[in-house]
């Protein structure tokens, strides 16, 4: 029933005409001007506090950041007017603009910046600041960060940490925030809607859209709201996006929101994790099995079958990002996949369609979280193709709790994708193997890769960091890619799909990371209504 409550809440708001400023008809009348929008997304934040992870990986909307991403993933200044790194690679100095104010009228100073990062580090939420030794406000407009070790992803972190006001921060901040960003907090009704308005005192370009209602709806409820003409933008699913709705068009946004198999790399020898969960799989521990699966899958066909064509082939955790190694791309080659298996001694000796070797049948399970129709569809489509080379995959839906116990010994249909290369470090560094954080359950461990990852993290220039991230994927002989050790079989990047009302320009979208709700809003301040 709740999805209908969401829908009628939004419809009621629109009919009263109090918050969104949007008419309820499906098209703009000639010459009509609008200054508000209603956006329907499926994911609701747990807090609007940047120190608790709000805006991490996207943009905090209400709060400003020191620097921010351009659409091409390069950096530009926001609160900062200048920044530089000293020769040791440990000390970053930021100079702030002097005209930024919080929405309560107080000036934004270096003290607020220092307070923000100290608070975020102490919170130990989703923001990793373990490398931050101290942060100091030297003057009102100068702040110095001292790191415990060179950290090339520091700027990526800074770009997603919204600055909070020291004078107005407390236990209730996450539900009633004060910020200095382009948007001003108005109201939050949990499980229903978040209402923002343009910050008319913003130091940057003030949004042309003045009122925003973000409604939290299931995809079915959002689709019904679009059909009724009661929302302006709505996240939708690949199964629904093929439906034409008068007055709307589909915005198809490319993403690095990937789906692929993790495949345990160790044999089943009775080892267990610290939590007591079994490690290893006697089938997937074989490199030729993992690579044969990788080469046998026609990723374009999977995207067509599982995503109605709303997806693209995936070859790494960071396709399209500037630190990605394009040499990791492989072509579908079923004959080569069969040869890999045959050369390693796998053969279908009993004629049941499944190859075996030394009494071990090439059959294993891949898990996906129940209720996730996209992961289910991708897994089944890939498994069907892999069956043609004699490998049998049983696709099983289960709870996240059960998956967390079995992911060290079964394959898993996982999904990642971030605007920060630090994700690659978490996915592949040896010390992260077999932890309960979902990053490296397959147990990938490599001294060579560890060296590249460490060099990338410690690099003093972006160019040096990117080069080492790429070498970690493939250095010509080995790496994390499917041409190398193949701990993952990457399959598709999922397009993020939205119904957008005709006449609304949602600007140039960045390559979206994992999750299709908040990434849509990262350039919200650039959205505008076009004149008809």
Image (cartoon, helix red, strand yellow):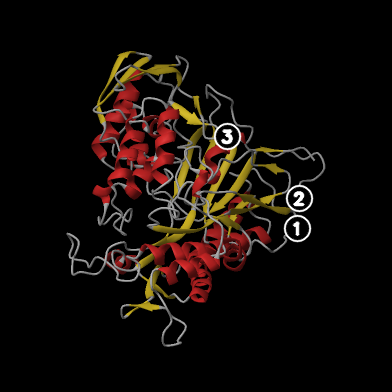
Label 2 Cα neighbours within 10 Å, binned few <14 / some 14-19 / many ≥20: some
Q: Which residue is mark 2?
A: 27
Q: Please give the name of the residue rendered at 31% of the width and 61% of the height, measured from the top-left corner.
A: 265
Q: Earlier in the sequence, mark 2 or mark 3?
A: 2
The answer to whether residue 65 shows anywhere in this view is: no
Q: Is residue 270 above or below residue 101?
A: below
**Dot 1 or dot 3, earlier in sequence:** 1
Badge nearest the viewer, 2 or 1: 1
Q: Which residue is mark 1?
A: 246
Foreground pick, 313 / 422: 313
Assess disc 1: are there few (<14), some (14-19) or many (≥20) residues with their C-alpha within 10 Å of its C-alpha.
few
Indicate which disc residue 448 carries.
none
In the foreground, 495 or 186? 495
The residue that label 3 is drawn on is: 525
Looking at the image, is mark 2 or mark 3 nearer the viewer?
A: 3
Is 346 on the left-hand or right-hand side of 530?
left
Q: As drawn, which residue projects farthest toward the right?
A: 30
The foreground one among 413 and 372 is 413
Residue under the image location 38 percent in, 14 percent down: 141
């Amino acid at each position: 029933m709740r999805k209908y409550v969401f829908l009628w809440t939004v419809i009621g708001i629109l009919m009263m005409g109090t918050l969104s400023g949007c008419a309820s008809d499906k098209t703009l009348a000639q010459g009509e001007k609008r200054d508000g929008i209603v956006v329907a997304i499926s994911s609701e934040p747990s807090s609007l506090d940047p120190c608790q992870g709000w805006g991490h990986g996207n943009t905090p909307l209400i709060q400003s950041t020191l620097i921010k991403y351009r659409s091409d993933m390069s950096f530009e200044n926001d609160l900062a007017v200048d920044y530089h790194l000293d020769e040791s690679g440990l000390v970053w100095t930021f100079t702030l603009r002097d005209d930024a104010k919080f929405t309560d009228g107080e000036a934004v100073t270096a003290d607020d910046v220092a307070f923000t990062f100290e608070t975020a580090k102490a919170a130990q939420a989703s923001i990793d600041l373990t490398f931050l030794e101290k942060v100091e406000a030297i003057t009102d407009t100068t702040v110095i960060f001292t790191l415990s070790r060179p950290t090339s992803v520091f700027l990526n972190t800074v770009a997603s940490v919204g600055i909070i006001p020291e004078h107005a921060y407390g236990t209730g901040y996450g539900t009633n925030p004060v910020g200095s960003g382009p948007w001003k907090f108005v109201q939050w009704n949990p499980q229903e809607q978040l209402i923002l308005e343009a910050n008319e005192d913003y130091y940057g370009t003030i949004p042309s859209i003045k009122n925003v209602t973000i409604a939290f709806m299931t995809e079915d409820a959002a689709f019904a709201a679009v059909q009724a003409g009661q929302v302006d933008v709505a996240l939708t699913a690949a199964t629904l996006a093929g439906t034409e709705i008068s007055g709307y068009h589909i915005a198809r946004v490319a993403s690095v929101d990937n789906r692929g198999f993790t495949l345990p790399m160790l044999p089943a020898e009775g080892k267990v994790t610290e939590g007591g969960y079994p490690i290893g799989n006697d089938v997937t521990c074989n490199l030729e099995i993992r690579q044969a699966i990788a080469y046998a899958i026609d990723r374009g066909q999977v995207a067509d079958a599982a995503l109605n064509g709303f997806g693209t082939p995936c070859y790494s955790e960071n396709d399209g990002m500037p630190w990605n190694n394009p040499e990791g791309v492989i072509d579908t080659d079923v004959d080569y996949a069969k040869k890999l298996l045959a050369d390693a001694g796998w053969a279908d000796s009993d004629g049941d369609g499944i190859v075996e070797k030394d009494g071990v049948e090439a059959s294993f399970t891949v898990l996906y979280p129940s209720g996730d129709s996209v992961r289910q569809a991708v897994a089944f489509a890939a498994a069907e193709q892999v069956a043609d080379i004699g490998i049998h995959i049983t696709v099983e839906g289960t709870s996240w709790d059960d998956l967390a116990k079995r992911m060290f010994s079964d394959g898993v249909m996982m999904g990642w994708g971030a605007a920060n290369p630090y994700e690659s470090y978490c996915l592949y560094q040896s010390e992260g193997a077999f932890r309960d954080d979902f990053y490296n359950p397959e147990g990938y461990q490599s001294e060579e890769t560890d060296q590249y990852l460490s060099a990338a993290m410690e690099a003093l220039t972006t160019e040096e960091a990117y080069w080492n991230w790429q070498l970690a994927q493939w250095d010509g002989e080995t790496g994390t890619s499917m041409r190398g050790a193949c701990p993952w079989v990457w399959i598709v990047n999922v397009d993020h799909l939205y119904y957008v009302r005709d006449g609304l320009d949602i600007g140039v979208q960045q390559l979206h990371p994992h999750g299709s709700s908040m990434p849509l809003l990262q350039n919200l301040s650039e959205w505008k209504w076009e004149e008809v």
